[in-house]
Image (cartoon, rainbow, N blue to C red):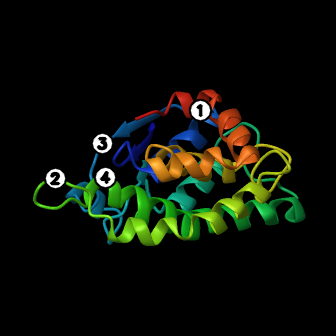
Amino acid sequence: MALEIIGFPRSNFVRTVCMVAREKGVDYDLTPAMPHSDEVRAIHPMGQIPVMRHDGLELAESQAIARYIDDSFDGAPMIPRDPRAAAPVNQWISMTASSVDQLLMRRYVVEYAFHKDDDGNVVRTEIDKAIKRFPRMFAMLEAAVAPGFLGSDSFSMADCFLVPILSAARSFPEGEAALAGSPALTAYFEKIAARPSFVDTAP
């Protein structure tokens, strides 16, 4: 049975697991589905995306799905097998999927995209709170990619978690400015964004 990834194509986490599949050379079917839809809830009780089906296995949560793909298919490992080399990669996967996602996606991108008043104007309350935290967040990421990749000197799963978030954040003015003001992060983003796994998974 082919790998089936289920979720909203514009979701950063859906794009992450699709990138991992592309990097591993795995063919997959992307089934569009919104969060909290019946199809998603059948696999994830909280209705969150992505979810996955493969060979009788149903799985939820992007980190679990990405690791399953990495472990189950041939190709270069997306997380180093050496524990000491894997540790910072796992650290940044966790941090990106939590703190970075919460600030840049949930409190910024999602607010811009979906929180409008009755006249269709963006409600900026949460956005303005979020951008006050941008300097610290972008300084942290600028330092983290100094080795060339996120917390590493080679491409890893952590990069698949971060770059879709940066791509979404730069679609709006303050995110674009924050990235432009971070030269190492900009160079990093442009490098990863040129990879076929990123290009091929554009929503």
Image quadrant where residue 88 sits: bottom right
First in residue order: circle 2 vs circle 3: 3
SS label for mark 4: helix
Which class describes the residues within 10 Å of circle 3: few (<14), some (14-19), or many (20+)? some
Q: The C terminus appears in which quarter of the rendering?
A: top left
Identify which residue is drawn at 88% across, 59% down: 82
Considering the numbered disc 1 on the image, is that residue within a helix, a strand or a loop?
helix
Tags 2 and 3 in contact by the CB under 8 Å rule?
A: no
Q: Position of residue 103 (x, y in %)?
A: 50, 67
Disc 1 to disc 4, C-alpha distance: 25 Å
According to the picture, the residue beneath numbered tag 1 turns out to be: 197
Residue identifier under label 3:
32
Specify whether 43 is left or right of 100: left
Q: Position of residue 139 (x, y in %)?
A: 71, 62
* Among the two numbered marks 1 and 4 on one chain, the one whose residue lies closer to the N terminus: 4
- Identity of the residue drawn at 74% across and 55% down: 142
In-image side of 80 versus 131 (left or right): right
Q: Around disc 4, counting alpha carbons within 10 Å, would you say few (fewer than 14), some (14 to 19), or many (20 or more)?
A: few
Identified by mark 3, the residue type is Pro
Residue found farthest to the left = 118
Foreground label between 2 and 3: 2
Q: Mark 2 highlights which residue?
A: 120
Say which of 100 and 91 sits in front. Answer: 100
- C-beta proximity under 8 Å, tags 1 and 4: no
Q: Amino acid at mark 4?
A: Ala
In the image, what residue occupies the spot 46% across and 47% down?
A: 173
Q: Considering the image in quadrants, where does the N terminus appear?
A: top left
Residue at numbered disc 4: 113
